[in-house]
Image (spheres, rainbow, N blue to C red):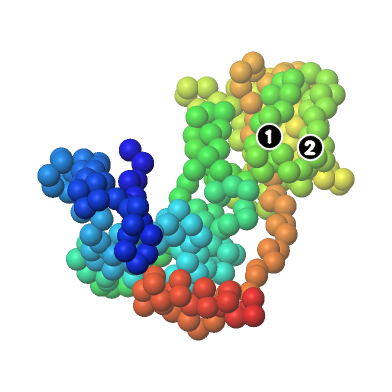
Amino acid sequence: MAKQTINQGTAPTGAGGDTFRTGSAKLQANDDEIYNYLGDGANLNKLGTAAFKNTGTQAGNVMEVGAFGLGGLSPFVTQPADVKQSGFFHTLNHDDMAYCAFLNIMHSGQDVYRWQLGAPMGDATLSKLKARIRTESGWSSEAKIWNQHNTTVDSNGFIKAASPIVKLFADKIELNDEAQQQEITFEKLGVGDYLVKGSSGFAQEGWYIETPKDANGNLLVAVVYEQLENGDISVKTYDYMLNNKGRIVDDTETPLDIPETRWIDLRLQELPQPEIEIPEPIAPPDFQPTGLAEAVATVMESYNDTEQ
């Protein structure tokens, strides 16, 4: 029903307007519609509890979009270790994570106990995802979260730390996300003779090659590899033979392709990452909010000052 408006007639006497009874009927109809829509016809019992709450970030308030970083931009803080509210935040520099976004979870009873999970914004992968926890003794060291972006499963089914990874098959190569940032090509020069070109070369730290094995840990093919002067990687695979002392050795006279469905893992050197240009914080560098409302108010004040 559309709102019914009382005709007050012409001032000052109200000539031509609704009678008292007609005006009362309109008021009653408007009231009935409100009570039927927001209640059971007699009581306004469909409003729920939120209708009688204030908006804000204090206990008992109804949160607005953006509170604690939910549904809006995350608040900026200079010291992640000092945050004592659950929510989503960001900071400019945190260890090796420039412009880090992080989640802070507080204990229900004491603000001493909390944990954080963070990753750098701007990175194309989650290879630097980390977490830490705080007790009365202070913060723990940061734990690196291993995931598909910083590990690889080798041809023997084992999980290994990853950077750029090339899977070398008998007739092709497969690149992980980081390796795809390089212009890597593959050439098969002959049986068991492979050339991986255009890469950054073998990793300088940790493992850099993994060869396929059988269920007992025996190598399926003998592998001879080297990084050439131009940075290309040469990999040659051979059969095995028994020498005159009865020992199993490489038979370099008998080249052998990598077995079907198996591969050799090549771990490459990571490319240097471009420096991220970090914008100036809107809030003063030494600002530490005691509550989200104060943080939002400070940011909004900074915006207003800029516009003026």
Outermost residue, right direction? Answer: 230
On screen, residue 270 above or below 68: above
Give percent across and percent down for residue 200.
76, 47
Residue at the (24%, 66%) spot, across then down: 59
Q: Toward which corner of the image does residue 240 lie, by quadrant?
A: top right
Q: Amino acid at mark 1?
A: Leu
Between discs 2 and 1, the one toward the N terminus: 1
Whether tag 2 and tag 1 are in contact, CB under 8 A, the answer is yes
Q: Which residue is mark 1?
A: 175
Figure disc tally: 2
For label 1, the SS is strand
Q: Amino acid at mark 2?
A: Ile
Residue at the (50%, 29%) spot, across then down: 157
Give percent across and percent down for residue 172.
74, 24
On screen, residue 265 above or below 79: above
Nearer-the-camera pick, 126 or 83: 83
Residue at the (34%, 46%) spot, across then down: 3
Give percent across and percent down for residue 303.
58, 74
Q: Which mark is residue 184?
A: 2
Nearer-the-camera pick, 97 or 62: 62
Tell me the crowding category of disc 2: few under 14, some 14 to 19, or many 20 or more residues within 10 angstroms, Cα based: some
Residue 3 falls left or right of residue 50: right
Nearer-the-camera pick, 239 or 129: 129
